[in-house]
């Protein structure tokens, strides 16, 4: 008889893999990506392809020549990082800046800690914030969504416009109407503009059980409640909750960035605290801080708190609360 | 429909051998009967080389209260009392019986007629004594002596008897088939145990993938006082004692406590059938129904097997080992153990034999943990497997104890659900064993 395999139980295993998870995230990002291609044209394509290719390339090179480990590019996580980085960039950013951003995201944000799962901070946001601080002018000159399809001018000499959050902070411009806010017809980073497309992606992630509702819902609810209170206190000074929810990177951040596995807490209880923290910090930066947008910083700050949340907030243990119940029928 | 409230997974249930009638496997020429088939002290042989025994005769007596009698599964002559090799290559003290005259001469006291015996005039204590004499242990897999479980520690009182008819392990169907074929007997058995425990209420928990059994049991329940049927939503590990109690009566057994702390006693449905046979038919436990299954097994089904028959003989009866078999598992795929030796005998613990084809046998290569938290979501005890594996790798035993490692029921949900194929449960087991040793040493010092 031939040799038998011996291993400890269990002998059954889920079909789920890292690769499938990442593929699901990419599928969930597709609607928002299509919208950005529609609004920002060739610029969106150039920026996103540059970011993806350079992220994958840097991960491959670092893994091959510095860490000398298994080739980890096949797990698609670098593709997700690249696409998400592109989503956070204006669609007319010079290519060399994108490459630098990718190097920071993958090299410093992810691989320096040992690759997938070991990074304490969201690599995409590390890359983005690095670029924002280094090249503030280029990073905040957002092209206006195209009114007509003119592929070639969309990258090279795109018209720029103020974002709604910039307008709230005193820049010149007019707030878009509700419909444009929902669809994404406004200035902003490549992938963050269309709330509807991002929500569709979020629902897909929930259905495929890639994420749970805890983080997105707690982030969005906190922002909504906080800004609604401010608006009620002084409607002239503070924008209403719906404007805050639909502008800037909040939807993208709450659904795709804050839920990043490696940098968010491990159980549902601590995820709620984490989400509430992100919501509060976001509103504080947006309303009272110097920057018009604060989602990136809020997520990075809460990333730093994640180990503490993991340490102090444990999942609900079996038998934790023994209620004096009667035998129920 | 209800289920337990924390964690759980949904593996494919793969009940390939469902509704295959129970069939007896031919008696072995030689029976190798291990004297330690249960939790507790090994039994003490009471026969010597050369003795002739009949089927059902006591051959090894329980050594203390937490131990169980062992009976002869075939009639014949004791050839030796020696060590056999168990499924993992370890020595296993056993009694060897060579069959004579076909090997099927039963003790006269055993009632071999198929007639139902509904009448029982015994008191609770007498019932428990009969269960103890018959060497009955929990046939769900743990093999804890049943008479011990039916004797709650002083000061505690059982309120409700819960019958585990969940069979949440994928592939296994032996309990299901037993329920379909011996429903009446099982109900009498439940009444007997209720009398032994002095409880008025019994709940049978059945998972919803056994609709025919639920229907049959509902019908039977109409004729039996105090027995309720509770259909349960499919979820592994619902057959875990604590999970089943949570699912049926919505009480959670506190950490480190026994089910009796919430007034519940759980018995497996196969155990209940054994109790019926022992009390009403005077038949000790020397055979059980086990599932022989696998995607490529030709005659997969539910077989009545005398203990001491080798796994190889049982598999032969089910059509032999398929060509592409790469792993043979005693039990189900979630908690069963891969065997290296098919010449080991089947015994009280063997609830099934699963022959796994090549494509499913090997574990996949582990990759980085991406901290997705799937293991935390899956853990039915609310533990954090991702953390425990890190601590076990670094030998942080104290930290593991603080993180409730001892609550782990080793169900395998964490390892099952890991997209990175991390060996979570392996390390958790290592930690649990080590921490358990540390705790025992500490309490011994006091």
Image (tube, grey):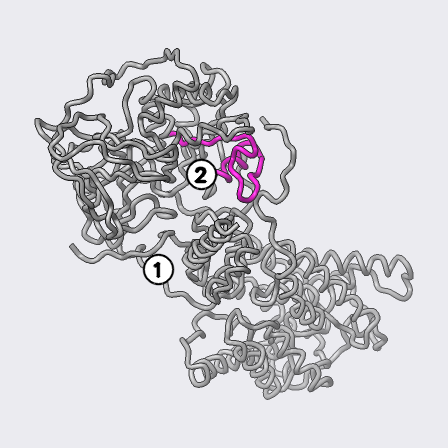
Kindly identify which numbered label has been placed on residue A159: none
Residue B255 horizontal side relative to residue A235, left or right: left
Count residues near mark 1 (Cα–Cα under 10 Å), then give few for <14, some for 14-19, many for 20+: some
Location of the N terminus of chain B by quadrant is top right
In this rendering, the count of numbered labels is 2
Q: Residue at x 75, y 67 (%)?
A: A282
Residue B248 lies within the magenta run? yes
Q: Position of residue B212 (x, y in %)?
A: 39, 27
Residue range highlighted in magenta: B241-269
Q: Are marks 1 and 2 on the same chain?
A: yes
Kindly identify which numbered label has been placed on residue B363: 1
Q: Position of residue B334 (x, y in %)?
A: 38, 48
Secondary element under disc 1, as helix, strand or loop, is loop
- Given the image, what chain letter belongs to the residue carrying mark 1? B
- Given the image, what chain letter belongs to the residue carrying mark 2? B
Q: Nearer the viewer, residue B254 or A249?
A: B254
Q: Position of residue A322 (x, y in %)?
A: 63, 39
For residue B257, say whether it is visible: yes
Q: Residue at x 29, y 56 (%)?
A: A6
Kindly identify which numbered label has been placed on residue B239: 2
């Amino acid at each position: 008889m031939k040799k038998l395999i011996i291993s400890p139980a269990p002998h059954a295993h889920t079909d789920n893999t890292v690769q499938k998870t990442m593929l699901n995230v990419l599928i969930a990002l597709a609607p928002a990506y299509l919208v950005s291609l529609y609004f920002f044209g060739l610029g969106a394509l150039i920026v996103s392809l540059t970011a993806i290719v350079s992220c994958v390339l840097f991960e491959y090179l670092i893994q091959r020549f510095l860490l000398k480990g298994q080739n980890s590019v096949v797990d698609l996580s670098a593709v997700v990082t690249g696409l998400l980085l592109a989503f956070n960039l204006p669609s007319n950013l010079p290519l060399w800046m994108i490459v630098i951003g990718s190097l920071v995201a993958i090299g410093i944000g992810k691989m320096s800690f040992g690759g997938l799962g070991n990074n304490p901070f969201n690599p995409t946001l590390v890359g983005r914030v690095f670029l924002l601080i280094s090249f503030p002018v280029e990073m905040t000159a957002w092209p206006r969504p195209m009114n007509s399809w003119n592929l070639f001018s969309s990258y090279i000499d795109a018209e720029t416009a103020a974002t709604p959050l910039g307008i709230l902070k005193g820049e010149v411009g007019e707030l878009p109407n509700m419909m444009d806010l929902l669809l994404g017809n406004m200035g902003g980073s490549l992938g963050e503009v269309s709330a509807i497309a991002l929500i569709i992606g979020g629902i897909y992630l929930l259905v495929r059980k890639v994420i749970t509702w805890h983080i997105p819902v707690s982030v969005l609810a906190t922002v909504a409640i906080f800004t609604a209170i401010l608006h009620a206190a002084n409607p002239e000074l503070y924008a209403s909750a719906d404007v805050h929810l639909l502008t800037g990177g909040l939807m993208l951040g709450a659904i795709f960035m804050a839920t990043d596995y490696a940098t968010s807490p491990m159980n549902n209880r601590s995820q709620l605290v984490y989400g509430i923290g992100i919501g509060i910090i976001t509103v504080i930066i947006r309303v009272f801080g110097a920057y018009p947008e604060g989602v990136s910083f809020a997520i990075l700050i809460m990333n730093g708190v994640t180990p503490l949340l993991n340490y102090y907030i444990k999942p609900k243990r079996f038998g934790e609360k023994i209620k004096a119940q009667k035998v129920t029928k | 429909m209800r289920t337990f409230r924390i964690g759980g997974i949904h593996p494919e249930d793969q009940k390939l051998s469902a509704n295959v009638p129970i069939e007896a496997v031919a008696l072995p020429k030689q029976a190798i009967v291990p004297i330690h088939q249960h939790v507790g002290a090994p039994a003490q042989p009471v026969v010597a080389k050369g003795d002739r025994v009949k089927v059902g005769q006591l051959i090894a007596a329980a050594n203390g209260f937490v131990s169980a009698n062992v009976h002869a599964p075939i009639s014949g002559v004791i050839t030796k009392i020696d060590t056999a090799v168990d499924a993992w290559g370890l020595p296993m003290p056993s009694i060897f019986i060579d069959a004579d005259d076909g090997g099927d001469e039963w003790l006269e006291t055993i009632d071999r007629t198929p007639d139902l015996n509904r009448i029982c005039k015994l008191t609770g204590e007498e019932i428990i004594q009969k269960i103890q004499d018959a060497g009955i242990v929990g046939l769900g897999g743990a093999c804890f002596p049943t008479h011990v479980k039916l004797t709650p520690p002083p000061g505690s009182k059982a309120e409700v008897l819960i019958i585990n008819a969940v069979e949440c392990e994928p592939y296994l169907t032996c309990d299901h088939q037993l329920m379909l074929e011996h429903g009446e007997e099982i109900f009498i058995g439940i009444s007997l145990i209720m009398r032994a425990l002095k409880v008025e209420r019994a709940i049978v928990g059945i998972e919803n993938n056994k609709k025919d059994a639920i229907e049959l049991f509902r019908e039977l329940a109409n004729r039996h006082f105090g027995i309720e049927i509770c259909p349960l939503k499919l979820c592994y590990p619902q057959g875990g004692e604590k999970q089943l109690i949570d699912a049926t009566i919505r009480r959670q057994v506190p950490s480190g406590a026994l089910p009796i702390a919430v007034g519940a006693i759980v018995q497996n449905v196969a155990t209940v059938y054994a109790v019926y046979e022992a009390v009403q038919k005077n038949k000790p436990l020397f055979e059980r129904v086990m599932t022989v299954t696998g995607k490529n097994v030709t005659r997969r089904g539910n077989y009545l097997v005398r203990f001491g028959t080798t796994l190889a003989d049982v598999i032969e009866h089910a059509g032999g080992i398929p060509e592409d078999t790469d792993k043979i598992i005693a039990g189900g795929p979630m908690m069963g153990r891969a065997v290296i030796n098919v010449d080991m005998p089947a015994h009280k613990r063997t609830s099934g034999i699963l022959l796994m084809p090549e494509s499913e046998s090997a574990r996949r290569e582990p990759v980085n943990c991406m901290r997705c938290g799937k293991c935390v979501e899956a853990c039915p005890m609310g533990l954090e497997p991702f953390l425990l594996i890190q601590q076990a790798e670094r030998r942080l035993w104290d930290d593991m104890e603080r993180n409730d490692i001892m609550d782990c029921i080793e169900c395998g949900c964490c390892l099952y659900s890991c997209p990175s194929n991390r060996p979570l449960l392996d390390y958790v087991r290592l930690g649990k064993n080590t921490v358990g040793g540390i705790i025992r040493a500490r309490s011994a010092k006091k």
